[in-house]
């Protein structure tokens, strides 16, 4: 009888309260229905226009914008990654840079909370005040700066993930704080840093508003840099979205952009899951 009472008590503890469970289930249902509705509409409208948008000679084609997207990502990602990782290394251990590390962590929270559109608008005002008319290349560098706080925050999380015991053990063996960060924490964080790099790449791929503002994509006579001759795919979707006559091609381009970001996010999540599983097995 005592065993039955314990089993009954354990069963009752595992059952979630009905009201929160219903609320969470409703939220999940709304989210799933919204995603299915949006993607379903893009498929319904965009798939019939797929032949058109993949035609390199069609003005609504996505091949040139995809090349421009790759161009921006290749230019913007390395500076964001380098600055982000080194800044995270400085903030990872207060024993390396003392109070500067604490101040940097607080600054990351403040800087990272500024909306991307606001940062892009500030960059545009600064460029115009110096008489500089940004091209797609300049916009890529601005987008890199905009994403540096995100890369730093993700890198800091990767460096400090379950690292307290490792830091204490290596310090007890006589390792210096800088040695611990560079030779222990950094190699251990490589898988998570690769995932962070992919996540930042997805932000750059989808940074339509920032690129459109900084490079003046919606300004009269606005144009991309000479080697590309097109705007990134996200900018094309943003600038063509108000043209009702071509909404089918825009929907097809948006579907391609959605799939591209989903693939990148999927790769990042697979890497993070594999790393978590490996650490749980240790």
Image: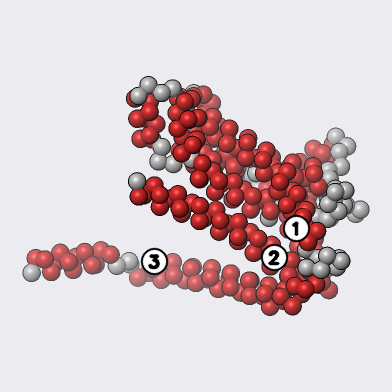
Crowdedness of circle 1 by 10 Å Cα count: few (<14), some, many (20+)?
many
Query: In the current view of this chain or complex, which residue is farthest to the left?
Result: 1
Residue 256 marker: 2
Crowdedness of circle 2 by 10 Å Cα count: few (<14), some, many (20+)?
many
Q: Secondary structure at mark 1?
A: helix
Foreground label between 1 and 3: 1
Instruction: Tell me how far mark 1 sits from mark 3, CA to CA.
Output: 44 Å
Residue 233 at what x, y percent from top left? Answer: 75, 59
Q: Secondary structure at mark 2?
A: helix
Instruction: Determine the residue positioned at 35% across, 70% down.
Output: 18
Q: Is residue 237 above or below residue 149?
A: below
Q: Quadrant of the N terminus?
A: bottom left
Instruction: Tell me how far mark 3 sits from mark 2, CA to CA.
Output: 37 Å
Residue 20 marker: 3
**In the drawing, does residue 135 fall left or right of residue 149?**
right
Instruction: Determine the residue positioned at 63% across, 71% down.
Output: 39
Instruction: Determine the residue positioned at 51% across, 38% down.
Output: 156
Q: Considering only order in the chain, which callout, 3 or 1, is on the residue closer to the N terminus?
A: 3
Q: Considering only order in the chain, which callout, 2 or 1, is on the residue closer to the N terminus?
A: 1
Residue 221 at what x, y percent from top left? Answer: 91, 53
Q: Are marks 1 and 2 in contact (CB under 8 Å)?
A: yes
Q: Are marks 3 and 2 in contact (CB under 8 Å)?
A: no
Residue 28 at what x, y percent from top left? Answer: 48, 68
Q: Nearer the viewer, residue 17 or 265?
A: 265
Q: Considering only order in the chain, which callout, 2 or 3, is on the residue closer to the N terminus?
A: 3
Q: Are marks 1 and 3 in contact (CB under 8 Å)?
A: no
Q: Is residue 245 above or below residue 115?
A: below
Residue 66 marker: 1
**In the drawing, does residue 276 fall left or right of residue 255?**
left
**In the drawing, does residue 16 fall left or right of residue 29?**
left
């Amino acid at each position: 009888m005592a065993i039955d009472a314990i089993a009954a008590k354990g069963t009752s503890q595992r059952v979630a309260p009905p009201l929160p469970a219903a609320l969470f289930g409703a939220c999940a249902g709304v989210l799933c229905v919204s995603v299915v509705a949006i993607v379903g509409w893009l498929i319904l409208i965009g798939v019939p226009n797929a032949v058109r948008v993949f035609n390199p000679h069609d003005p609504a084609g996505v091949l040139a914008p995809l090349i421009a997207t790759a161009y921006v990502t290749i230019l913007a990602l390395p500076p964001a990654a380098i600055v982000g990782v080194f800044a995270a290394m400085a903030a990872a251990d207060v024993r390396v840079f003392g109070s500067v590390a604490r101040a940097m962590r607080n600054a990351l929270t403040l800087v990272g909370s500024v909306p991307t559109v606001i940062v892009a608008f500030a960059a545009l005002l600064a460029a115009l005040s110096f008489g500089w008319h940004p091209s797609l290349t300049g916009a890529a560098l601005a987008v890199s700066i905009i994403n540096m706080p995100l890369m730093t925050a993700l890198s800091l999380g990767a460096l400090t993930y379950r690292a307290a015991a490792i830091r204490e053990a290596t310090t007890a063996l006589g390792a210096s704080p800088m040695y611990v960060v560079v030779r222990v924490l950094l190699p251990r964080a490589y898988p998570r840093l690769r995932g962070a790099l992919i996540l930042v790449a997805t932000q750059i791929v989808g940074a339509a508003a920032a690129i459109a503002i900084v490079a003046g994509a919606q300004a009269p006579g606005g144009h991309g840099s000479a080697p590309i001759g097109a705007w990134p795919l996200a900018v094309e979707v943003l600038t063509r979205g108000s043209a009702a006559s071509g909404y089918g091609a825009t929907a097809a381009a948006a579907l391609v952009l959605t799939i591209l970001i989903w693939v990148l996010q999927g790769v990042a999540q697979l890497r993070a899951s594999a790393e978590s599983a490996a650490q749980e097995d240790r």
